[in-house]
Image (cartoon, rainbow, N blue to C red):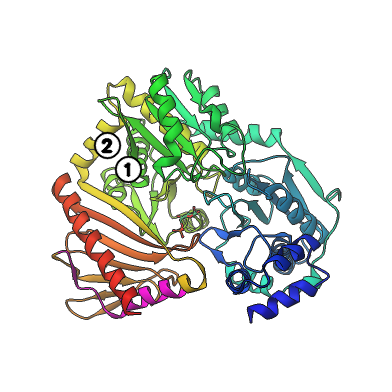
């Protein structure tokens, strides 16, 4: 099957010569051919993502043009007769600019006006641009925090969120596209309008409006790394315009670099990404370190401790701090609106719910992926049921305000600095504030383990592990009973004590959540952005050491179950 596809590509007049050359070099290597052609690139949690190269399972001019043609067909069908436009942004990765140009040329050839950013921009600014220009769609060429050999294609709807409702139809339209049907024009077509500074200023002004307090210590020593990506200009500009005097950028990581040469991975979830920044912080007396990923939708935070060391916070901890800061500050100013709402995901810590309820703010859960949070924000707006205040995920994504509909590391960086500067003025570090939050709301200790399962065989292994857990319903682990299992693929909540099931009102997704008696839980799900099985733990015991101990025991046991399943397969 995959060999046939290779032959089609080698013979097709619609496949670029350079891609054919690449294929000729690997055509005798079976595993390479299989990996490149065993499937089409899929739309996962964050759009389409894959390695750059030749093949249907790769990011290249053919797969980008095909996807764009499918989206154009979808838009022309859905909005038939209307004047259509789309916005396009791209990050600092290899081929990002070229793929953005190709995307623009295909849209323009399909009679869709294009707003194309003149140079690299953050993903959240694209989300803003879609709404600002009244576009029906948006595209960002980025593979977010993935390694340098990857690129990707995120698709936005008219509300500025990544597509959810129309995703299946868009995918089926893309699959129907025959390479010979892809329309293409030159990139100097007058349907393609370049955008730049003017939109930056409008966006930055909106971000600044989300600042809650000015009674903060703006002498705070901030070390910032854009990790060679798009954050450098906007994050520094916002902090500068708000009067933060001591923002030092990590020089080695300031400039865009598609190889992300100074880091193992440009992912702020990994402490290794902060290695140089921590060194710089030590030299410059840095109090906090922030680092944004290449498309600047995620931000990581590292905080100086009382002994002068630097402690990385995970996404749940930063999220809890931000939520606590935003709600307590708005509350103090009497600015929490009626029917205020906070949105997190089913794999994000329950501490968020506890903090929100202190301020009588409702909290909602969605499936993993900020697109679901954005979808709910739109629903709130359409039905006027709630006022969105803050949304976050454990995977380092945060959003305040509603003018952006994706996680926004420009907004989050600003709020993190403001929060640290506010507590500094009140004589506290963020680590001390976090301790206070735990004391007040409980010791929620979280961790996520990602197990890599690469290629076609990896995919099937992951599938069988999930099926095994689905069938052999885990009823206890590490001495803790599991009374409830949520199976999001089957759409049911199972009570293991009574055997009764209830319907879950979420879209179907391959996720299993095992809940303990005291509200702790563990979740298994294949990642939608990388070839990994993710195992999430959230343990809440009466004190920190008990929580840590239960976490360690649970981790050990679940990993050994996964090992056993693999050996038996
Ligand atoms: O766990 P995954 O499916 O890999 O997704 C992890 C994260 O990926 C991207 O960054 C999405 O924008 C996030 O919303 C999501 O939480």
Residue 305 in the image: above or below residue 54: above
**Mark 2 surroundings within 10 Å by alpha-carbon count, few (fewer than 14), some (14 through 19), many (20 or more):** some
Q: Where is residue 416 in the image (x, y as percent from the top left)?
A: 41, 33
- In the picture of the structure, the residue carrying the numbered disc 2 is 434
Mark 1 residue's CB less than 8 Å from ligand 1: no
Looking at the rendered structure, which numbered label has been put on residue 201? none
Spatial CA span between label 2 and label 1: 7 Å
Secondary structure under the numbered disc 1 in the rendered image? helix
Q: Could you say which is closer to the camera, residue 169 or residue 462?
A: 462
Does 540 sit left or right of 107 as displayed?
Answer: left
- In the picture of the structure, the residue carrying the numbered disc 1 is 317
Q: Could you say which is closer to the camera, residue 43 or residue 37?
A: 37
Q: Position of residue 211 (x, y in %)?
A: 46, 31
Q: Position of residue 105 (x, y in %)?
A: 80, 55
The reply to whether residue 415 is visible in this rendering is no
Specify start and end residues of the magenta stretch as a single range: 460-478
Who's the residue at 25% across and 25% down the image?
A: 307
Q: Could you say which is closer to the camera, residue 164 or residue 285?
A: 285
Does 530 sit left or right of 69 as displayed?
Answer: left
Who's the residue at 59% across and 39% down the image?
A: 230
Does 255 sit left or right of 275 as displayed?
Answer: right
Who's the residue at 63% across and 51% down the image?
A: 140
Picture mark count:
2
Residue 18 in the image: above or below residue 215: below
In what quadrant of the picture does the N terminus appear?
Answer: bottom right
């Amino acid at each position: 099957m995959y060999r046939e596809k290779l032959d089609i590509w080698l013979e097709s007049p619609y496949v670029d010569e350079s891609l054919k050359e690449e294929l000729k070099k690997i055509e005798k290597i079976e595993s390479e051919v299989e990996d490149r052609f065993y499937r089409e690139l899929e739309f996962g949690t964050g759009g389409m993502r894959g390695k750059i190269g030749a093949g249907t399972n790769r990011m290249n001019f053919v797969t980008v043009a095909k996807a764009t043609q499918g989206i154009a067909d979808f838009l022309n069908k859905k909005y038939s007769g209307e004047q259509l436009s789309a916005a396009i942004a791209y990050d600092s990765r290899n081929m990002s600019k070229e793929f953005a140009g190709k995307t623009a040329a295909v849209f323009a050839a399909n009679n869709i006006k294009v707003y194309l950013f003149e140079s690299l921009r953050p993903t959240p600014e694209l989300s803003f641009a879609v709404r600002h220009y009244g576009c029906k769609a948006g595209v960002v060429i980025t593979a977010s925090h993935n390694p340098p050999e990857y690129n990707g294609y995120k698709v936005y709807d008219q509300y500025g969120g990544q597509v959810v409702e129309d995703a299946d139809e868009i995918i089926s339209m893309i699959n129907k596209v025959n390479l010979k049907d892809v329309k293409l024009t030159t990139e100097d077509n007058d349907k393609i309008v370049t955008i730049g500074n003017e939109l930056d200023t409008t966006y930055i002004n909106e971000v600044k409006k989300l600042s809650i307090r000015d009674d903060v210590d703006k002498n705070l020593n901030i070390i910032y790394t854009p990790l060679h990506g798009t954050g450098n200009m906007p994050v520094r500009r916002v902090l500068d315009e708000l009067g933060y005097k001591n923002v030092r950028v990590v020089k080695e990581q300031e400039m865009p670099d598609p190889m992300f040469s100074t880091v193992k991975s440009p992912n702020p979830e990994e402490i290794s990404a902060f290695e140089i920044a921590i060194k710089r912080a030590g030299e410059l007396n840095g109090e906090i370190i922030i680092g944004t990923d290449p498309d600047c939708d995620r931000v990581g935070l590292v905080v100086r401790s009382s002994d002068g060391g630097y402690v990385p916070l995970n996404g749940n901890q930063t999220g809890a701090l931000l939520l606590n800061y935003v709600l307590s500050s708005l509350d103090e100013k009497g600015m929490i609106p009626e029917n205020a709402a906070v949105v997190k995901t089913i794999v994000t810590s329950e501490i968020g719910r506890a903090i929100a309820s202190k301020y009588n703010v409702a909290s909602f859960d969605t499936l993993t992926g900020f697109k679901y949070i954005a979808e709910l924000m739109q629903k709130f707006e359409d039905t006027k049921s709630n006022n969105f205040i803050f949304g976050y995920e454990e995977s380092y994504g945060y959003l305040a305000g509603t003018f952006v509909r994706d996680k926004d590391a420009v907004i989050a960086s600003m709020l993190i600095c403001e929060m640290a500067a506010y507590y500094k003025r009140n004589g506290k570090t963020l680590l001390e504030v976090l301790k206070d939050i735990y004391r007040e709301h409980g010791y929620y200790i979280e961790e996520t383990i990602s197990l890599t399962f690469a290629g076609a065989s990896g995919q099937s292994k992951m599938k069988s592990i999930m099926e095994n857990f689905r069938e052999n319903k885990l009823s206890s682990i590490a001495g803790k009973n599991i009374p409830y299992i949520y199976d999001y693929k089957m759409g049911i909540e199972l009570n293991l004590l009574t055997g009764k099931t209830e319907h879950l009102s979420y879209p179907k997704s391959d996720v299993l959540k095992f809940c303990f008696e005291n509200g702790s839980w563990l979740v298994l799900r294949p990642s939608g952005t990388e070839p990994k099985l993710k195992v999430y733990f959230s343990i809440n015991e009466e004190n920190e050491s008990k929580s840590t101990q239960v976490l360690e025991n649970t981790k050990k046991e679940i990993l050994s179950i996964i090992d056993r399943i693999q050996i038996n397969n």
